[in-house]
């Protein structure tokens, strides 16, 4: 699947817009503006989850879902000397922090800072320090706590990385926050294809971009109760396990470029999963398989366990270097995830048998 200029322009703008957990609204505005021509109705819940609806009057409801938030930091403590200590907002990795530029979202706007770290010259003849939450700190050029506060920076301010989108070797998309705004891009593209190809669905389709996944699947949990879907197909990222220092015996065998990953897990409904696999085979869409022992760790679990049980499935996108600022996904895989969701939707019928024997 080739991406047109409009789609790529949206992807770049969407990824470059900060959307940390609990503060997803700016990214959601970009997303809603893009899907507006392709849906009949757009809704937003109290915490910022957005969803576009095709056929809002239909009784049978199908959700395709991704999550919109990205990992970040909170200002937790400001020293008398004007240095800032942090706590996580989501699964932020302290080991990549030293020497990174950050944006501190203060009351007067964005303030630039850096995660400082002692020079290599000063670390000789001692045990090499390891970055930890207790010892990483941000320097915003201030010399006192009062100066930091005069910049509009207080405890509770959000901190994000500014690393922006680019393409690598015409093969990969690279950016922070591909986990999982690339998912929001993919479900938006499904909506676009349905509209442009003039497909009429026999059910209501809810293209859902949830908040707060990174801290506990909370947005999906809330919106599942609001929509009350009959079926949910969730897309998220999973690990490319072919890079160094990853144990395939533990993490499975998935690779960027080899296609979408279809998950097997207790929360994944057999009928929906098999429909996805059959569709992939029939449409010659490459795919991979992965297993999760107790939970998928994605919004699939929230949907599956809501409303007395919603038949749900997970289509994941292989990704390298998760929760870093250089997350990478294969452009070909992105296109194939879009195609797989799109083609699967065309096979869903409200009269499908969903109950197990």
Image (spheres, grey):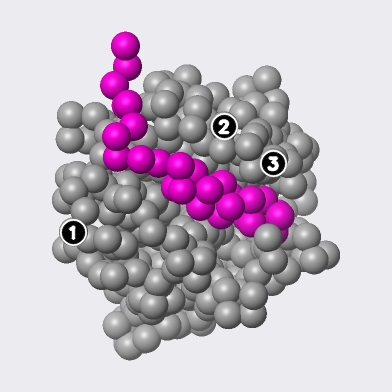
SS category of the residue bearing label 2: helix
Question: Where residue 184 sits: x, y (%)?
Answer: 46, 60
Q: Nearer the viewer, residue 252 or 101?
A: 252
Query: Which residue is the site of mark 2?
Result: 278
SS category of the residue bearing label 1: loop
User: Which callout, 3 or 2, points at the residue further toward the start of the chain?
Assistant: 2
| 195 falls in the magenta region | no
**Label annotation for residue 136:** none
User: Which callout, 1 or 2, points at the residue further toward the start of the chain?
Assistant: 1
**Label annotation for residue 57:** 1
Question: Where residue 331 sits: x, y (%)?
Answer: 69, 59
The image quadrant of residue 289 is top right
Q: Nearer the viewer, residue 74 or 80?
A: 74
User: Which residue is at a point 24% across and 29% down the rendered structure image?
Assistant: 309
- Figure check: 91 above or below 97: above
Q: Quadrant of the N terminus?
A: bottom right
User: Which residue is at a point 50% across and 71% down the rendered structure image?
Assistant: 196
SS category of the residue bearing label 3: loop
**Mark 3 surroundings: few (<14), some (14-19) or many (≥20) residues within 10 A:** few
**Label annotation for residue 284:** 3
Whether residue 123 is visible here, answered yes or no, is: yes
Q: Residues in magenta?
A: 329-357
Question: Left or right: where does residue 15 sit relative to residue 122?
Answer: left
| 346 falls in the magenta region | yes
User: Which residue is at a point 80% across and 66% down the rendered structure image?
Assistant: 170
Question: Where residue 11 sits: x, y (%)?
Answer: 56, 71
Whether residue 26 is visible here, answered yes or no, is: no
Q: Nearer the viewer, residue 199 or 71?
A: 199
């Amino acid at each position: 699947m080739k991406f047109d200029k409009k789609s790529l322009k949206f992807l770049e703008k969407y990824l470059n817009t900060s959307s940390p957990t609990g503060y997803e609204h700016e990214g959601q505005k970009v997303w809603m503006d893009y899907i507006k021509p392709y849906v009949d109705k757009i809704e937003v819940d109290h915490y910022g989850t957005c969803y576009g609806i095709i056929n809002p009057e239909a009784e049978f409801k199908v959700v395709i879902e991704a999550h919109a938030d990205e990992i970040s930091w909170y200002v937790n403590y400001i020293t008398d000397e004007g240095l800032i200590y942090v706590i996580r907002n989501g699964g932020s990795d302290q080991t990549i922090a030293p020497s990174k530029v950050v944006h501190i979202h203060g009351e007067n706007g964005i303030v630039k800072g850096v995660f400082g770290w002692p020079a290599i010259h000063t670390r000789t003849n001692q045990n090499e320090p390891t970055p930890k939450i207790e010892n990483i700190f941000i320097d915003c050029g201030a010399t006192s706590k009062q100066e930091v506060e005069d910049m509009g920076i207080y405890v509770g301010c959000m901190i994000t990385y500014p690393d922006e989108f680019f393409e690598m070797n015409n093969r990969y998309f690279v950016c922070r926050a591909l986990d999982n705004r690339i998912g929001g891009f993919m479900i938006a593209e499904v909506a676009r294809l349905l509209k442009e190809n003039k497909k009429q669905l026999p059910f209501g389709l809810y293209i859902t971009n949830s908040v707060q996944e990174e801290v506990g699947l909370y947005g999906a949990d809330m919106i599942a109760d609001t929509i009350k879907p009959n079926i949910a197909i969730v897309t998220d990222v999973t690990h490319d396990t072919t890079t160094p220092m990853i144990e395939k015996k533990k993490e499975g065998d998935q690779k960027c470029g080899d296609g979408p990953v279809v998950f097997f897990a207790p929360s994944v409904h057999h009928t929906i999963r098999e429909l996805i696999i059959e569709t992939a085979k029939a449409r010659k869409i490459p795919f991979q398989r992965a297993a999760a022992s107790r939970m998928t760790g994605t919004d699939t679990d929230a949907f599956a366990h809501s409303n007395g049980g919603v038949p749900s499935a997970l289509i994941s996108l292989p990704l390298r270097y998760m929760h870093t600022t250089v997350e990478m996904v294969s452009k070909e895989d992105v296109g194939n995830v879009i195609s797989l969701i799109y083609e699967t939707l065309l096979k869903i019928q409200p009269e499908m048998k969903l109950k197990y024997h």
